[in-house]
Amino acid sequence: MDAQSGNGPTEPLPAAEVMGWGLARVWGVEIIRLNLVPSGPVSRFGSEGFSVAGVGRIQAGHLACLRLAADGRIGRHPAVGRQLLLLVSGDATVSGDDGAPVELMPGEVAVWAPGESHETTSDAGMTAFVVEGEVELSPGVS
């Protein structure tokens, strides 16, 4: 990952059968290059430096890759369903209904209940996955 731009590699994958839309097959494994998946900027709820790329659908929900630029913000809004934000890289500060800031580290997941008001900011920029919908957490996780 290019630390300056937050973009992943753009050179061809070795022995890749390019399948389009950021998807390639390398030695029998499908690889998604998130920086090549079409994305669009989002400014709703006062969000800044925020883009989202749909990655797939799950039953009764969705999976998306989120990117926040340095000093970016996903404005406060209610979760449509249970929402999980998995921080992949960078930094993130999240809050729930109470507005209390909580710093996430890469590999940590923020979980919001359906209808819960929440917000995410990043000082240096971040890449994260979000799963939202009818998500049931594994026993012992919640």
Image (cartoon, rainbow, N blue to C red):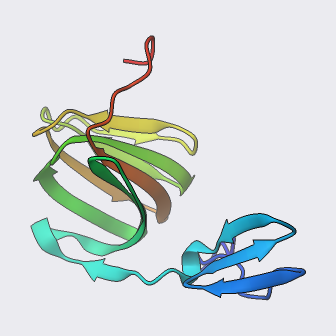
Q: Position of residue 16 (x, y in %)?
A: 82, 81
Does residue 93 appear left or right of residue 29 in this picture? left
Q: Identify whether 91 is placed above or below 35.
A: above
Residue sitting nearer the eye, 113 or 3 = 113
Q: What's the residue at 19%, 42% (across, down)? A: 81
**Count of numbered circles on the image:** 0
Residue sitting nearer the eye, 27 or 66 = 27
Q: Identify whether 40 is placed above or below 70.
A: below
Q: What's the residue at 47%, 56% (across, down)? A: 128
Q: Position of residue 109 (x, y in %)?
A: 45, 37
Q: Residue furthest top?
A: 140
Report the quarter where the N terminus lies: bottom right
Q: Position of residue 94 (x, y in %)?
A: 31, 44
Q: Position of residue 141 (x, y in %)?
A: 44, 18
Q: What's the residue at 47%, 46% (across, down)? A: 86
Q: What's the residue at 36%, 18% (across, down)? A: 142
Does residue 18 appear left or right of residue 126 in this picture? right
Q: Identify whether 68 is placed above or below 17.
A: above
